[in-house]
Image (cartoon, rainbow, N blue to C red):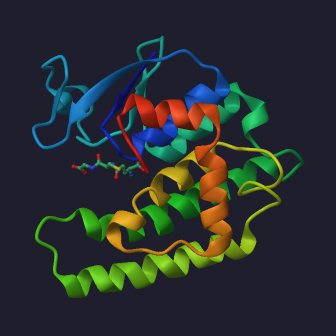
């Protein structure tokens, strides 16, 4: 199995979730500017979407999109999804919110030459989305007392907050430190040379 990733990108969520699940995986770095991988391969030929993450299974089949990859990991490792009859749907609800509302609200910061006015609007939107999560945070993690695959996704997006002037609400700042202290998270950050 191989995860195509870029340094500090949302693919870090999948790397953390794979480690938390104990699923062995190889990693190949993608240079997003050139769409080539560290082995010199043409990434666009591997994943025509051109962006990370992409997970190639041992069968050779490829899964893209964080929601799909993280759901696949949760299916392999049921401890990483919430329990109860609505557990699976709570997970999808959470992944969808993180992807389409929180992740998307940070998109502006990665557009080259974006105006300060656009950044200010993006900060306001990101804060609104994070405020909702701060208010609905579970006992220790997003969906309750135990970690699910939604947590690494939210955590990785939160690593982009400070460098872009987005202030984390207090409950999320504490949650951020809790996540950082997990060995799988610390190891994944170190593997990409990140200090967050
Ligand atoms: N819809 C995709 C979005 C993934 C995404 O935004 N990837 C970013 C890194 S966080 C990327 O590769 N951007 C480079 C590009 O779009 O060219 C998903 O949720 O997996």
Image spot of residue 5 (x, y percent) = 34, 33
> Can the viewer see residue 150 in this picture?
no
- Please provide percent x and percent y for residue 12: 44, 39
Could you tell me how many numbered marks the image carries? 0
Counting from the top left corner in percent of width and height, residue 168 is at 53, 71
Relative vertical location of residue 27 with respect to residue 111 in this rendering, above or below? above
In the rendered image, which quarter is residue 191 located in? top left
Q: Residue furthest right?
A: 84
Observer-nearest of 28 and 48: 28
Q: Which residue is rendered at x = 40% and y = 45% of the image?
A: 195
83 is higher (above) or lower (below) than 54: below
Q: Does 62 sit left or right of 184 as displayed?
A: left
Locate residue 143 relative to residue 108 in the image: left or right. right
* Snapshot quadrant of residue 62: top left
**Of the pair 104 and 183, the residue shown nearer to us:** 183
Answer yes or no: is residue 84 visible: yes
> Residue at point 49% right, 60% down?
158
Q: Residue at the location (67% across, 35% down)? A: 74
Q: Is residue 13 above or below residue 1?
A: below
Q: Quadrant of residue 171?
A: bottom right
Nearer to the camera, 45 or 185? 185
Residue 117 percent coordinates (x, y): 23, 88
The residue at the point 66 percent across, 62 percent down is 174
């Amino acid at each position: 199995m191989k995860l195509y990733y870029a340094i500090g990108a949302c693919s870090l969520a999948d790397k953390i979730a794979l480690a938390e699940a104990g699923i062995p995986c190889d990693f190949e770095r993608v240079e997003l500017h050139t769409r080539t991988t560290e082995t010199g391969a043409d990434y666009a030929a591997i994943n025509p979407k051109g962006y990370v993450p992409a997970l190639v299974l041992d069968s050779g089949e490829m899964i893209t999109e964080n929601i799909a990859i993280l759901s696949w990991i949760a299916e392999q490792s049921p401890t990483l999804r919430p329990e109860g009859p609505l557990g699976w749907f709570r997970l999808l609800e959470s992944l969808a919110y993180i992807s389409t509302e929180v992740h998307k609200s940070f998109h502006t910061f990665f557009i080259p030459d974006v105006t300060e006015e656009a950044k200010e609007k993006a900060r306001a939107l990101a804060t609104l989305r994070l405020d909702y999560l701060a208010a609905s945070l579970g006992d220790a993690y997003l969906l309750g007392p135990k970690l699910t695959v939604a947590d690494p996704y939210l955590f990785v997006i939160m690593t982009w907050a400070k460098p872009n002037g987005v202030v984390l609400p207090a409950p999320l700042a504490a949650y951020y430190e809790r996540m950082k202290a997990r060995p799988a998270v610390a190891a994944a950050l170190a593997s990409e040379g990140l200090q967050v």
